[in-house]
DNA sequence: TGATTTCTGTTGAATTTTCAACAAAAGGGA
DNA sequence: TCCCTTTTGTTGAAAATTCAACAGAAATCA
């Protein structure tokens, strides 16, 4: 656990909590760490939503797969980020999404009951934890709105440009890498992969962007 | 304020708080009530995100309008529901959405700072409020996932059927009313209105559903 | 290094959506 | 009630997406 202390301290869930106290707290919360190889399922759709997940290393994707096998990528979480907290906190019966390892990763799982209900030891950190959880959920909601703003566009071109604009704004630079391959980007934007590839080529020919693998440069100021 | 006490007690934000204490609390929080006529703007996109809103009567729509004037309806909130809490809690600079009155409505506004930061009087209810806020945000996130599951479908037919299924499941009955007219439903599902009307007619002809104005009956068990 | 698998871009056909325009129906106000 | 506005369903044409198939490029693995 100690070797991940740095990551844990950057986790929004533990903001304002000292390193020393953090380790004690994790013991009290019954936190445990598991390793997952790439593409393995961290949490399966339909399974009980008891646990809050924290990415200690690597990254995960939160995906939704419908009846026909169509995948939507809802989000990707890297080190120090929290996932599945909404389902655990809302006490839904079953996970409505699947979480899979995007790379080999170490994941910390905490039973949400231990966070929401004060324990026998009456530790003093619960208030802070719940406050942080609230902040984290608010931030997630804002990011969700951003995604909806992107996917609500009607054409592949508009979705792509909206997404790339957000990326550029986020990194403060017109050149940036995205964490998706073509199929994943298509599943994030909710469009057809081949149509996406075609659109990227078209935008490149038109001089709107440059692109080499998953590294893009926006040549216009949208 | 007192005439809305019933509604306020049903508000998830005030769960577990006694009526008497609630009224004192609202004074301390500096809550104020405003009336809005139908179609008036309750919160404008771009304005500071300081306030949490609570619907006391009537209903509001949370919408996103893009550069070209295309509207997306993100959600509709009726009496006792909370809105804009995520933006206020996440302390974003500007509202990324617009909130408009769907019907004539009374809205309670509370400055989020008063909730997040304990006041001089050191009232004891902040912990409970923050806990409730956290629960509320978690629930909202789950509902967002549900909306994404609907809008991520690729065809108008699939989106419509997914939406109607959720409605039917929600009210536990195959016959139900939806809170949208055709244009609003199209803006919620993110499809073209005329295409939506055509699809409804088609589904009616096929015997999949019955529909009279905004009252639907699903004839299949999807 | 070589073989195998995965990823990517391209194409054309079929399907679907979007767009614009219009008329009938419904609703609101005087 | 009548008039005017809004909503709704329909249609056909244009545009865009999806789908399937394929070949070359890139990555993986032994």
Image: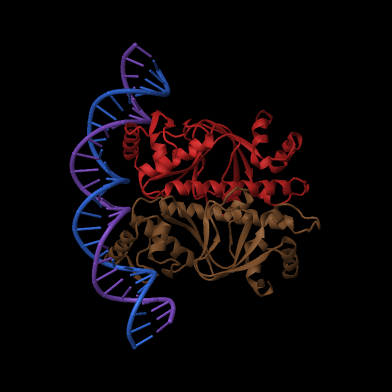
Chain colours: A brown, B red, C blue, D purple
Frontmost residue, A209 versus A213: A213
Give the image quarter of residue B32. top right
Residue located farthest toward the right when viewing the structure as drawn: A121
Q: From the viewer's perspective, is residue A33 above or below residue B49? A: below
Q: From the viewer's perspective, is residue B24 above or below residue D15? A: above
Left or right: residue B48 compared with residue D19: right
Q: Position of residue B78 (x, y in %)?
A: 55, 35
Whether residue B50 is visible, yes or no, is no
Number of numbered discs overlaid on the protein picture: 0
Give the image quarter of residue A167. bottom left
Quadrant for the N terminus of chain A in the image: bottom right
Left or right: residue A2 compared with residue A71: right
Left or right: residue B154 compared with residue A8: left
Left or right: residue A165 compared with residue B81: left
Whether residue B107 is visible, yes or no, is yes
Instruction: Give me the residue at 42% from left, 37% from top.
Output: B184
Give the image quarter of residue A128. bottom right
Q: Position of residue A172 (x, y in %)?
A: 47, 67
Q: Position of residue A194 (x, y in %)?
A: 31, 61
Frontmost residue, A148 versus C20: A148
Quadrant for the C terminus of chain A in the image: bottom left
Instruction: Give me the residue at 51% from left, 48% from top.
Output: B144
Frontmost residue, B173 versus A194: B173
Instruction: Give me the residue at 64% from left, 41% from top.
Output: B12
Instruction: Give me the residue at 28% from left, 63% from top.
Output: A202
Q: Position of residue A70 (x, y in %)?
A: 41, 54
């Amino acid at each position: 656990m100690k070797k991940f202390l740095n990551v844990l301290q950057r986790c929004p869930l533990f903001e304002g909590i000292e390193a020393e106290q953090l380790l004690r707290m994790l013991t009290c919360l019954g936190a445990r760490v598991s390793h997952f190889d790439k593409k393995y399922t961290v949490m399966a759709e339909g399974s009980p939503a008891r646990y809050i997940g924290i990415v200690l290393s690597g990254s995960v994707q939160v995906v939704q797969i419908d009846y026909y096998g169509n995948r939507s990528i809802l989000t990707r979480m890297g080190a120090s980020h929290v996932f599945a907290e909404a389902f655990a906190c809302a006490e839904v019966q079953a996970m409505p999404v699947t979480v899979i390892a995007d790379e080999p990763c170490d994941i910390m799982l905490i039973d949400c009951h231990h966070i929401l209900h004060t324990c026998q030891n009456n530790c003093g950190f619960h208030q802070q934890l719940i406050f942080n959880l609230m902040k984290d959920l608010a931030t997630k909601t804002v990011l969700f709105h951003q995604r909806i703003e992107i996917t609500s566009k009607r054409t592949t071109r508009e979705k792509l440009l909206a997404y790339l604009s957000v990326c550029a704004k986020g990194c403060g630079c017109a050149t940036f890498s995205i964490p998706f391959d073509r199929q994943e980007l298509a599943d994030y934007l909710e469009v057809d992969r081949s149509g996406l590839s075609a659109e990227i080529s078209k935008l490149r020919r038109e001089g709107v962007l440059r692109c080499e693998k998953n590294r893009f440069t926006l040549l216009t100021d949208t």
